[in-house]
Image (tube, helix red, strand yellow):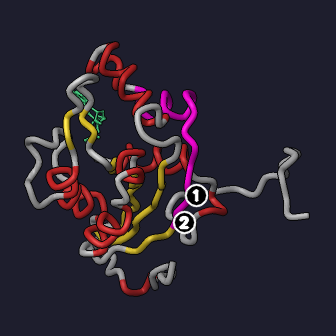
Amino acid sequence: MSESAPDEEKYAPEKKLQQCLVIIKPDGLVKSLTGNILTTLSETKLWIVGAKIVHVDRELAEKHYHKLKQEKGEAIYEAVLKYMMGEYHTKRVLALVYEGEDAIKKIREVTGETNPEKASPTSIRGRYGRIHTKTGVFENVVHASDSEENAEREIKLWFRPHEISHLIYSAVKKTMTKTEVDWQ
Ligand code: ADP
């Protein structure tokens, strides 16, 4: 990415600096929509401060959609987990963190409503989403955090502090004993 972390001095104190998690879902990747989606997101003039490909396992999908079962029911919940784990498309997503003033509102405006048939036709979901006839899942190509509370929870779930080039949530130094794969 050519972008770098924003200069904090640019933000007047009354302006709300936020971060927002965006996920390009498996259907977005398999349909080669990454470039188009990033271009539309760049219209917000926000900064990308984190980006990575993730293979979503059941544990991550469950934690991400921790309220969906009670909100939408078992059948939709299970189908949405499979969708996020890539069972219908490809087993990967692109996770991004955008940062800037009112980032959440700006991102949600360009992503559009959850139901792609109700989303504005010029929004990302309105342009590229569909409702799958067999599963009933709203295959809406992107996820975007919808509140400050959810953005913080989701960013901390998907990213480690060292993977984000500018932190707005506090982090601590810890000695980790985990064995990790490194370059040989
Ligand atoms: P959003 O992604 O807009 O924040 P939700 O958190 O309510 O919306 O839902 C999470 C995801 O589950 C949606 O993005 C969509 O892919 C899927 N979904 C939500 N509601 C439905 C529904 N009624 N039928 C099918 N899929 C749904």
> Is 39 left or right of 174, judged from the image as shown?
left
C-beta proximity under 8 Å, tags 1 and 2: yes
Image coords of residue 9 (percent x, y): 42, 86
Residue drawn 55% across the image and 55% down it:
53
Image coords of residue 62 (percent x, y): 48, 27
Asked whether residue 173 is drawn in magenta, I would say: no
Q: Is residue 88 above or below residue 164?
A: above
SS type, badge 1? loop
Q: Which mark is residue 167?
A: 2
Residue drawn 87% across the image and 46% down it:
179
Tally of numbered tags:
2
Q: Is residue 153 above or below residue 8?
A: above
Q: Which mark is residue 66?
A: none
Furthest residue in direction top, as rendered:
74
For label 1, the crowd category at 10 Å Cα-Cα, with few meaning under 14, some 14 to 19 and many 20 or more, is few
Residue drawn 52% across the image and 65% down it:
50
Quarter of the view holding residue 72: top left
Query: Any atom of ligand 1 within 8 Å of the CB at mark 2?
Result: no
The range drawn in magenta is 50-66
Q: Is residue 147 visible?
A: no
Furthest residue in direction right, as rendered:
184
Which mark's residue is nearer the viewer, 1 or 2?
A: 2
Tell me the quadrant of the picture where the C terminus can be found: bottom right
Q: Which mark is residue 170?
A: 1
Residue drawn 63% across the image and 54% down it:
160
**Relative to the observer, which residue lies in front, 127 or 113?**
127
Quarter of the view holding residue 131: top left
For label 2, the crowd category at 10 Å Cα-Cα, with few meaning under 14, some 14 to 19 and many 20 or more, is some
Taking the image in four quarters, ligand 1 sits in the one at top left
The amino acid pointed to by label 2 is: Leu
C-alpha span from label 1 to label 2: 7 Å
